[in-house]
Each structure stands twice: as structure tokens, then as C-alpha cells.
Image (spheres, grey):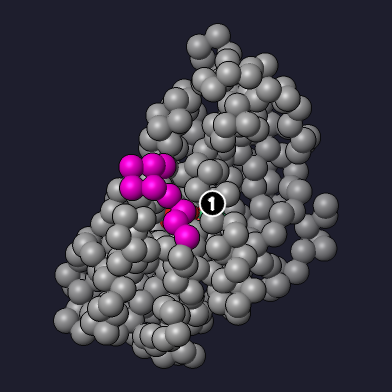
Amino acid sequence: MSNESINWDKLGFDYIKTDKRYLSYFRNGEWDKGTLTEDNQLHISEGSTALHYGQQCFEGMKAYRCKDGSINLFRPDQNALRMQRSCDRLLMPQVPTEQFIDACKQVVKANERFIPPYGKGALYLRPFVIGVGDNIGVRTAPEFIFSIFAIPVGSYFKGGMTPHKFLISDYDRAAPQGTGAAKVGGNYAASLQPGYKAKQAGFADCIYLDPLTHTKIEEVGSANFFGITANNEFITPKSASVLPGITRLSLMELAQSRLGLKVIEGDVLINNLDRFVEAGACGTAAVITPIGGIQYGDKLHVFYSESEVGPVTQKLYNELTGIQSGDIEGPAGWVVKVA
Ligand code: PLP
Ligand code: COI
């Protein structure tokens, strides 16, 4: 695909075949040094554990074009760490942090022409590890593949930084001691039907409650939840079944150090939403998406406004995206230059 045919102003979140992807194999107890390839098809055994038993995990991260033309990665060490934890949870070999970050840089450089211009989106990186090789028993795979591909993206939720409405789901995406905290495909398979139903009903996505009691907000589709109170508190759910998001982690730090908010990881009771003056969803793909309303049963709870972005949400957005694109100095180590 030629990048001349990409309309940078109309980018959404769709697959585009870019030039090169990274591919490394784990055989005989070690990862090979990996190669870049033009081929976007994987040829794997029909017995691969990734196909039958969901032995796979992935990451989502972005490379940003800065005003001066340089390219930033945002906290890639955190993605490497999270993927190592996901691999542990599914009995797969960890990819060392150094190899992970080096592979990210190779993929970004090899697809540089697909990085959207400054301010127009980002190059989304999708690292993943899958169990492959001939097998049939429920056990860990004999071999593994670690790969990263890249796609230019714009807004994940249509309309981007505008308030969106979400629907509380009756379904769970993960179990209390299950795999919710790991970024594994099974959680997303479980979310397909509830997400589809929410979108069919006119919502941006669904919100999951805690799987044990169904009384507390856990996640907003494929993003984390945060709420702002009138007492200047930034509150985000604490739970073993929530994915520990890197955007959320970063916002917790920025809310406290740059906006002077009190940061609380705690319960977000669905019957006590009145305490929030603003609410949002945050994640790599979602960036910060303001939550205009939450539908719970037959009641729509409106936060700041159904059409306008709240002032604290806007400040958090400006700070986060400013750091990512190099306009604002971030805390030490957050930004890693590719070139
Ligand atoms: N929660 C879920 C279920 C996700 O899929 C994501 C996206 O990666 C997040 C939260 C946000 O995580 P991060 O900020 O690391 O992208
Ligand atoms: C991300 O934010 O990177 C995600 O992985 C969310 C979704 C596209 C799966």
C-alpha cells in the first residue's frame, strides 16, 4: 500500500498492511535475534496452542511524530514488563526488555513513511507472542513466535476527544482470579459479544462490573476507567481482574504531580456515581475518551456533559498527549527516541 493514498485526517483504527514486521522464533530454549519481513502471513502448525487453547498475549503501544521530525515511543519498558507478566501467566517464555524495545525501534524505522504527521494520530504497534508447533494436549507449546506489526491510527472511538456513552454489561470479561490482569486474547474473545450488543444499542462500548459482586465498575471496553470528584480526587478501580494500563498508570502520576489531584485506587460503586463530576476511559488506543454518560438498567447517568469535555479531563489529555508528542517534558524515562 502506498502511503500517498492515506488520508491522515480520516484515520480510524483499521488494519493497513505496512511495509515490514518483526518476527522472532523461540526454539530450543531461546529467542533468535529476529528478522524484519514483508510477509504479513504466518504459517503455523494446525496443532498450535494459540489456535486451540488461547496461548497468546499481545501489547498495544504507539510511536509519535514530534514537531521537530523526531519519533517518540512512550514508556516501551512498561509494555515489555506487562508482556513478560502476561507470558508468565500463560506459561510462555518472556521476551527480554532489551529485545522487545529494539524490535519496536526496528519496526518503527522500517515503517517510518506510515507514521502520521505531527498531531494527526500515531503509528500503533502490536507486539504479540503465540504458542506454535505440532501439539494436541493441553500443555504449553513446543515453540513460540514473537512478532510486532505497525499500523497508522487515528481515533479508536469515533469522534475521539468528545463525550461518549457507555452501557453497563451483564457479562464479565474475566474471572476474579482469572486472566483479567494479563493482556491475553481470551479476555477479548469474551468481550466480543457484549461489545457488539452495546454498539448495536447505540453505545460506544460496554462497561464491565467486578465479576464477583457486580457492584463496582472495572473496565470500559478495552480501556481503564477514571473518575474526578468535586473534591479534586482522581479515582480509578483497584481490582485483580483489571488490566494494569500504562495510560492509567501515567495519568495517576500526572494527576498527582502536575494537576495536584489526590489519586485513589479504590472501589467505584455503580450506585454512587453522583460523586463524580467528570469521568473518562483511558488507554493506548482510546487515549482519553470522556465518558458523557453511563446507561445502567433504564437510567442514564450523565457526568460533566453529554457534549462537552470537562476541564480536568481536558487538562489530563493535554498533559499526556503533550508529553507523548514531545511538546511537554515528561517525567524521566517516559519518552524513548527512535530517531
Ligand atoms: N484495559 C483493557 C482491557 C485494555 O485492552 C487496554 C488497552 O491496552 C487498557 C485497559 C489500557 O491499557 P494501556 O493504557 O496500557 O493501553
Ligand atoms: C490498546 O489500547 O492498545 C488496546 O490494546 C486496546 C484494543 C485495541 C485491544
In the rendering, at what x and y percent does residue 314 appear? 39, 79
Q: How many badges with numbers are in the image?
A: 1
The residue positioned 26% from the left and 57% from the top of the image is 238
Q: Nearer the viewer, residue 294 or 172?
A: 172
In this picture, is 88 found above or below 328?
above
Q: Main secondary structure of the magenta part?
A: loop
Q: Nearer the viewer, residue 339 or 32?
A: 32
User: Which residue sits at x=68%, y=22%?
Assistant: 47
Left or right of 35, for residue 163 = left
Q: According to the image, label 1 marks what residue?
A: 190
Q: Does residue 115 appear anywhere in the picture?
A: no
Residue 99, above or below 105: above
The stretch in magenta equals 171-179
Q: Is residue 62 above or below residue 120?
A: above
Q: Is residue 6 left or right of residue 85?
A: right
Which image quadrant is residue 312 in? bottom left
Q: Please report the residue visible at 52 percent of the width from the left and 38 percent of the height from the top.
A: 57
Neighbour class for label 1 at 10 Å: few (<14), some, many (≥20)?
A: some
Does 43 lie within the magenta span? Answer: no
Amino acid type, mark 1:
Ala
Residue 281 visible in the snapshot: yes
Task: Check the image and report above or below for 65 versus 259.
Answer: above
Residue 39 location (% of width, % of height): 78, 35
